[in-house]
Image (cartoon, coloured by chain):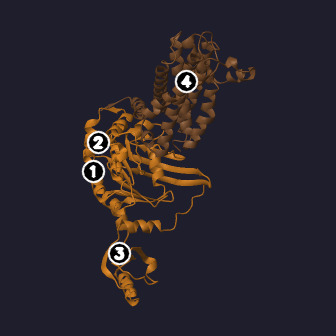
Amino acid sequence: MIRSGGARTLFYKEVLRFWKVSFQTVAAPVLTAVMYLLIFGHVLEDRVQVFEGVGYTSFLVPGLVMMSVLQNSFANSSSSLIQSKITGNLVFLLVSPLSHWSWFWAYVGASVVRGLSVGLGVFVVTAWFAKPVFAQPGWIVVFAVLGAGMLGSMGLIAGLWAEKFDQLAAFQNFIVMPMTMLSGVFYSVHSLPPFWQAVSHLNPFFYMIDGFRRGFYGASDVSPWLSLGVVGVSFAIAAALALRLLASGYKLRQ
Amino acid sequence: MPAVSFQQVHKVYAGAKGPFKALDDVSFGIEQGEFFGLLGPNGAGKTTLISILAGLTRATDGAVTVMGHDVRADYAEARNSLGIVPQELVFDPFFSVRETLRIQSGYFGIRHNDAWIDELLAELGLADKAGANMRQLSGGMKRRVLVAQALVHRPPVIVLDEPTAGVDVELRQTLWAFIARLNRKGHTVLLTTHYLEEAEALCHRIGMLKQGRLVALDRTANLLAGTTHTMLRFKTDQPLPAAVAPLARVTGRIVQVRARDAEAVERVLATLREAGVKVEDLEIGRADLEDVFLEIMHQAPPPEVPA
């Protein structure tokens, strides 16, 4: 009987949980992203050019990949937690000796795996429509992992806070969705009026997608180092808040 | 070192209608190897007390330890020493029985636990369900898995929160035989139950909670000896006369009347005869734990201690 790696078990369980229903948790979001690409790409291919020599469909792919990574990372930790809370099986975890660090590592780690799985799926399928280029691949990995980690942490916070599914849906629809849509997935913020450009620069999601796109085309709206700083700090804040809530037993241990 | 110790435990819940005192200065200990029964009506604070022990709820005040480990300051060791079977029939619908037990072992840092998992499955009559998804199991089977989950890490202290509520006779027998065997091997058992005959048969010592206070704490034998009453039991289909009705506990056709001595028994019988009540299957016996329980619960509440 060896006592080690409780956090690893929780991580494994969280990965297994979404993997067992991967048709719904991986295949479905890939299909959604491909639909966006087909429709927007078809309508806008000849009308919009953002970067010199990069077609609109090619421009859109990294944005869609990142959007899928972010939304699915958020969905994983938040839906797992709220389901366990509502069905009551979170008690099995609450009676275990796992520390708040273990909870955080396992939930966010599994969210990153889900986000990256969906992102990779979207990327592979969309490669048929737009030949991928990798100008600076290091940035692709850095922003994908950091972005997934941040949204996994936000999902953890939302899952702890929400007591009902509709509260979680509100968090997703009124916070995560607008921040994603207004981050430059479908456009370059340079095409916006100055006021909305300024607003976009307050949105950390903008830096995630801009930095991520830099990895593909070597071109971005702002310096990738600035993006790295903003995303890094945002992740640190989300992680610190999630850890604090876990350590205090917020809505878990009354 | 006691297996479990509660010292001046208070719990106040902030409710919509103002604060609610769920536990009020509860102190007692459970020795290692003991089989302890915690009784009390619904809402008396039993589950709150157990939740504090398991770290599911935090006490407003007081100290709680498991095998000498404080449940807050030293939570990991306290939880390693404790296996809890929750009252609610909860399960994770994503996994099979074996996966559920492997995952639970993993939370406690135990890998390669299949030998013990197989033993648990066999003991609880689950061997042929190991590969079944949790959703496919009946309520009784899910209850057995909950017991197995509580025991995967071989905790020295086992807590069962009303484990036999809504469970068929066969499982009840299997479960008690298994738990009694674990107790004989040295495991400490803390049980809450509504079935008082179970508590009487199994528990060495009993604590009774009422409105968040510990109102009785003694060896089961002493509690039973403490009541000198005789119980008169019979069946009837007729209404009881006014002089007897307030003393009687009626369950369907079965009537139980508490009588202090032989003379009182005679008086009750005379009253019934005069009222023309036809009595069947008359027997006279000693009071059981249920009588003791009701006696204690119907006593006036203890005086309020000023805050």
| Mark 3 lies on residue | B230
Within 10 Å of the Cα at label 2, are there few (<14), some (14-19), or many (20+) other Cα atoms?
A: some
Q: Residue at x 54, y 38 (%)?
A: A160
Nearest to the eye among marks 1 and 2: give it: 2
Residue A37 disc label: 4
- For the residue pair A158 and A207, the one nearer the viewer reads as A207
User: Where's residue B254, x and y in %?
Assistant: 36, 75
Nearest to the eye among marks 3 and 2: give it: 2
Within 10 Å of the Cα at label 1, are there few (<14), some (14-19), or many (20+) other Cα atoms?
A: some
Q: Residue at x 44, y 66 (%)?
A: B296
Colour in which chain B is shown?
Answer: orange
Mark 1–mark 2 Cα distance, whole angstroms, equals: 19 Å
Q: Residue at x 53, y 39 (%)?
A: A249
Same chain check for tags 1 and 2 = yes
Mark 2–mark 4 Cα distance, whole angstroms, equals: 45 Å
| Mark 2 lies on residue | B130
Q: Residue at x 30, y 40 (%)?
A: B131
Task: Classify mark 2: helix, strand or loop.
Answer: loop
Mark 1–mark 4 Cα distance, whole angstroms, equals: 60 Å
User: Where's residue A38, x and y in %?
Assistant: 54, 24
Mark 4–mark 3 Cα distance, whole angstroms, equals: 84 Å
Chain of the residue displaying label 3: B
